[in-house]
Image (cartoon, coloured by chain):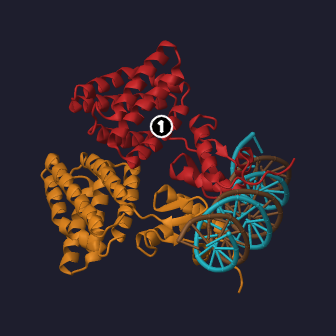
Chain colours: A red, B orange, C brown, D cyan
Amino acid sequence: MTTLPPDRTAMPKVAHELREAITAGQYAPGERLSEIAVAESFGVSRNTLRESFQALAEQRLITRIPNRGVSVASPEMADVIDIYRMRRILELGALASGSRLHPAYADMTAAVKDARAAEEAGDRPAVGTENMHFHSALVRFSDSPRVVSAFENVAAEMRLAFLRLNDPERLHQPFMGRNEVILAAIEADDLAAASAALTDYLADSERLLLSTYSRLGLS
Amino acid sequence: MTTLPPDRTAMPKVAHELREAITAGQYAPGERLSEIAVAESFGVSRNTLRESFQALAEQRLITRIPNRGVSVASPEMADVIDIYRMRRILELGALASGSRLHPAYADMTAAVKDARAAEEAGDRPAVGTENMHFHSALVRFSDSPRVVSAFENVAAEMRLAFLRLNDPERLHQPFMGRNEVILAAIEADDLAAASAALTDYLADSERLLLSTYSRLGLS
DNA sequence: CACACCAAGTTGTTGAACAATCCTTGCGGG
DNA sequence: CCCGCAAGGATTGTTCAACAACTTGGTGTG
């Protein structure tokens, strides 16, 4: 077994792949991440891995406790509430610049269409993915990289909240109709109606998530 | 020269102190940060420093270019525009929950009072600090740690934008009156008026900053 | 002047080391 | 039987020295 030369820019790649793995549920929320084990699995040194950890910790995707290492974040009810506060501010703020002429509008339309198709096909995970695509696109109305990346961060945290549940994807399903209402309001240039629909969406989605937490006795 | 035992949790401290040093202008925007030099000055190893760098990079306070190391961020016009987009969304979103009964209201009052006092005393830097305190407090209306820390991040970036200028503090001065208008509107429970005043504030502040950039031929 | 080349310096990464701290386990006392 | 506690092993946080890849600035050549 010959040792390969080290990848000269391994850290960003590792951070990215680890992020994907976490949001894909390959590591469960709350799961402990052993430095040695993870470093080995990514084929990097412990030091390089620690740099990647720092990036993910800043995004609140992992939790660092001094002398006790790293574990995948496991959002509690208080976090869920806060995540929705952030979502409300970012999404409603972005929607204020919404328009049927904006490129993001087409992406939202596509997300709704693909979600419908996935629903027909009974592909629940895809419905969930498209739902999040819809809201990612919505936030792009802001034309602001900072707003978009702040949203992507809370979206990843949301994903972790869902992963704590038994059937994560089930919770997305009831809301696809809501997205269509929002879209129609934007199409009609009625941003007030779109905002109202989005506000309802967020309130109901938060309620459902929190009550599921409560039902399962979480946090 | 006896070598001390390494600080068992040096990284967070270094990240914090480096952040302070950068926002205080001890390292100029765009300045190159040599790993060896900075590590030495903080009394930590290169590896530990790199972890701290990663945290600050995630906050956009420093810029990492592969194989060329780290430099203090130097916001360009496009960044300033984006920072204000983010500020508009966060601050207006938080202000929507504003109330004279909220603890943040008292902090805003204090910031205005201290700013007035600093202005009397001709202490320009303090006027700037209190101006930012005012807006930090405003954002706390959101009751959301995530919103607050997202704001603190763009506030630090703002600081870097100001540091690119000759007389950073001068730009804060014209706006203290605006803060008083916002405060009065909240006191009168007129959130619409407060939002309008804040919108004006942000637009004018952005305009002044951008025109100063332009006058100095920056970016 | 343009261009290839060279040398010095820096970065990105590794692997091994070590003390401090945590965690488990087994043991003894109540 | 349960609780506290001590010993041991495992893990973390950090350091150091090494090395190749890369950048940078200068030099010489055509």
Local crowd size for mark 1, using a 10 Å CA cut-off: few (<14), some (14–19), many (≥20): many
Q: Residue at x 17, y 53 (%)?
A: B186
Q: Is residue B16 above or below residue A153?
A: below
Is A83 left or right of A53, judged from the image as shown?
left
Q: Quadrant of residue B20?
A: bottom left
Q: Residue at x 30, y 54 (%)?
A: B84
Q: Residue at x 71, y 80 (%)?
A: B3
Q: Position of residue B58 (x, y in %)?
A: 50, 55
Q: Quadrant of residue C3?
A: bottom right
Q: Position of residue A212 (x, y in %)?
A: 47, 28
* Count of marks, rendered view: 1
Is A100 left or right of A81, judged from the image as shown?
left
Q: Quadrant of residue B111?
A: bottom left
Q: Is residue B91 above or below residue A96?
A: below
Residue B9 appears in the rendering: no
Task: Please tell me which residue lies in front, B202 or B149.
Answer: B202
Q: Which residue is mark 1?
A: A158
Indicate the chain on which mark 1 is placed: A
Is B62 left or right of A197, judged from the image as shown?
right
Is B168 left or right of A124, judged from the image as shown?
left
Q: Position of residue B68 (x, y in %)?
A: 58, 64
Residue at the top extreme of this rendering: A120
**Which secondary structure, mark 1?**
helix
